[in-house]
Image (cartoon, rainbow, N blue to C red):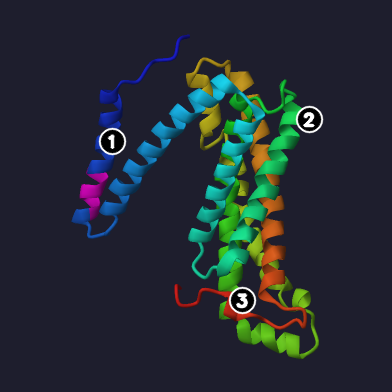
Amino acid sequence: MDVVSLSSVDLAIAASLLVLLSLLSMLLSLGLERKILFFGGRMTAQLLVIGLVLRFLFADGSLLLVLLMSTVMLLAAGREVQARQKRKIVGLSGYLISISAMFVSSFSVTVLALLVIIRVEPWYTPQYAIPLLGMLLGNTMTGIALAMDRMTDQLYGRRGEVEQRLLLGQTWQEASRDIRSDCMRTGMMPIINAMAAAGLVSLPGMMTGQILGGTPPVEAVKYQILIMFLIAAGTGFGVVSAIWMSGWRLFDERHRLRLDVLDVERA
């Protein structure tokens, strides 16, 4: 079956729903109307630009361009992780922790999937590499941001308890074990909920898109299962990496809690 082409009028009708939502926000005094319209417009512009970039990238298909595009996506994802935190680790170190965690969660898993599971030739074929990396970055980003945000917030809020444990002779790993475990669970919860609801409550986006594009449903389901497994594994690896790297930054070599590295004023 051929894909039904969408016109500008079709998209305008869908956009009108956001306008109605912003009006509802004004009536209810939610204060979200500007954000709804602004980010809706920004999303549209970003997707249109990326569509043009991908059309050029798919036509060229060189490894250099794929790596360049992937690096830009990684840097943007790291920035988003930082922006979503209430009390973030300030300076370059906080940004590097976010990027490193995103690299572990998405880059490594994407390369593994391309080389070992999908086995497309060449392995960096942009039609596979870029969408797969984008889905992993977008989904694992939420879990990593939640875990890091909760860790900095918990350490700041429970600093007295943590410091007492440190004074009693515990290492920072022992004094913060409960907090770190709770943060890891928090970061993993979104993907666990998504797996629990997939197919029963919701039809995931990739699977729906493939079916709308004419892919046989069973084949679309196989790819969606693959993506969910990759996202779950990537989120877990990324969350664990982010929490451990944050811990090494938030405590010094003498096992003292360092709240001076947190952006407390911003919170």
Q: Which residue is at 79% across, 83% downward?
A: 170
The answer to whether residue 203 shows anywhere in this view is no
Camera-nearest residue between 117 and 127: 127
Q: Which residues are magenta?
A: 20-25
Q: Nearer the viewer, residue 256 or 139?
A: 256
- Helix or strand or loop: what does disc 1 sit on? helix
Q: Residues within 10 Å of mark 2 (few under 14, many from 20)?
A: few
Q: Does residue 86 appear in this view?
A: yes
* Figure quadrant of the C terminus: bottom left
Q: How far is the residue under mark 3 from the one under mark 2?
A: 40 Å
- Report whether 166 appears left or right of 264: right
2 in the magenta segment? no
Mark 1, Cα crowd under 10 Å, few <14 / some 14-19 / many 20+, is some
Residue 233 is situated, as x and y percent measured from the top left of the image, at 71, 45
Q: Residue at x 23, y 42 (%)?
A: 19
**Quadrant hosting residue 108:** top right
Q: Are marks 3 and 1 in contact (CB under 8 Å)?
A: no
- Mark sitting earlier along the chain (2/1): 1
Residue 229 picture quarter = top right
Residue 15, numbered label: 1
Question: Which x, y percent locates residue 260?
Answer: 58, 80
Q: Give the mark toward the camera: 2 or 1.
A: 2
Q: Work out whether 37 lies above or below 246.
A: above
Residues at marks 3 and 2 touching, judged by CB atoms closer than 8 Å: no
- At label 1, which amino acid type do we have? Ala
**Residue 119 or residue 121, whichever sits in front:** 121
